[in-house]
Amino acid sequence: MIALRFLWRGQEEEHRMPEPLTRRGLLQGSAAAAAAIPVLGDAQAAAPARPQRQKEQAQMSAVGLTVNGREVHLQLDPRTTLLDALREHLHLTGTKKGCDHGQCGACTVIVEGRRINSCLTLAVMHEGDHVTTIEGLGTPEKLHPMQRAFITHDGYQCGYCTPGQICSAVAVLEEIEAGIPSHATEDLDRVAFSESEVRERMSGNICRCAAYPNIVAAIREVAGHGTAEDKA
């Protein structure tokens, strides 16, 4: 509430209320402001340009890898993941980018005999390492046994997760053969193949099409534990 002080005996107000804005006044003010804009623009153009801070370019790093038996040498931003190096720089697009957070397993590759999520590791961390992708397991003319088994048992539907599933499955059998235990291993001194072992070890590879029973059947066949029903 605005308090006004008045002087007695007909004297004028000490403080006057501002006059209300009229339509004419609004138009006059707008016209004046519009006329001033070009003048301000010319003044800014005439002023010397301020030096802009140069963007620092990330230092490129030389990375040497052996991918699917072939030596490759790349110049990469140190922040490049192994997944992006494979897909964007080597154009090996069989390895898929799913969640990009290490939660789905679609990007699984085999590095130095161990399966890893390639989206969670930097390419520079694998200088000199041997990397095997789905393209390195087999060819259309000569499929890897695991690839053939996935076809036989319909271990996929959309196929997006399949490269990671197959790479992981190959590594799973190697882990069991090497005696590496898992959370499902009952006897740590004797790691044996079992369906529970396979399911536990493959739990990091998600199949949204829910082809899990067929994937397990494919792995059982390659491991030599497939049944007649599996092969039917």
Image (cartoon, helix red, strand yellow):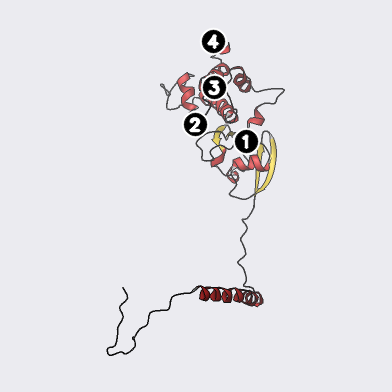
**Total labels drawn:** 4
Q: Is residue 221 left or right of residue 10?
A: right
Quadrant occupied by the N terminus? bottom left
Location of residue 223 with respect to 45 vertically, above or below: above
Q: For label 1, count other residues whose C-alpha is less than 10 Å away and answer few (under 14), some (14-19) or many (20+).
A: many
Residue 19: x and y, percent? 43, 78
Q: Is residue 46 above or below residue 159?
A: below
**Is residue 37 or residue 122 the one in the foreground?**
37
- Is residue 143 or residue 12 the one in the foreground? 12
In terms of image quadrants, where is residue 108? top right
Q: CA distance from mark 3 to mark 1?
A: 23 Å
As measured in the structure, the alpha-carbon distance from the residue carrying label 1 to the one carrying label 4 is 35 Å
Earlier along the polypeptide chain: callout 2 or callout 3?
2
Of 25 and 145, the residue lying toward us: 25
Instruction: Tell me which residue sits at (54%, 23%) in the image.
Output: 173
Can you identify the residue that label 3 sits on? Answer: 215
Q: Is residue 231 above or below residue 166?
A: above
Where residue 65 sits in the image (x, y, percent)?
65, 40
Residue visible at 65% across and 36% down in the picture: 93
Residue corresponding to mark 4: 229
Q: Earlier in the sequence, mark 3 or mark 4?
A: 3
Q: In whole angstroms, how far apart are the C-alphas of marks 2 and 4?
A: 26 Å
Real-space CA distance between mark 2 and mark 3, rounded to the nearest whole angstrom: 13 Å
Closer to viewer: mark 1 or mark 2: 2
Residue displayed at 60% across by 40% down: 83
**Image-based side of 195 in relation to 149, left or right:** left
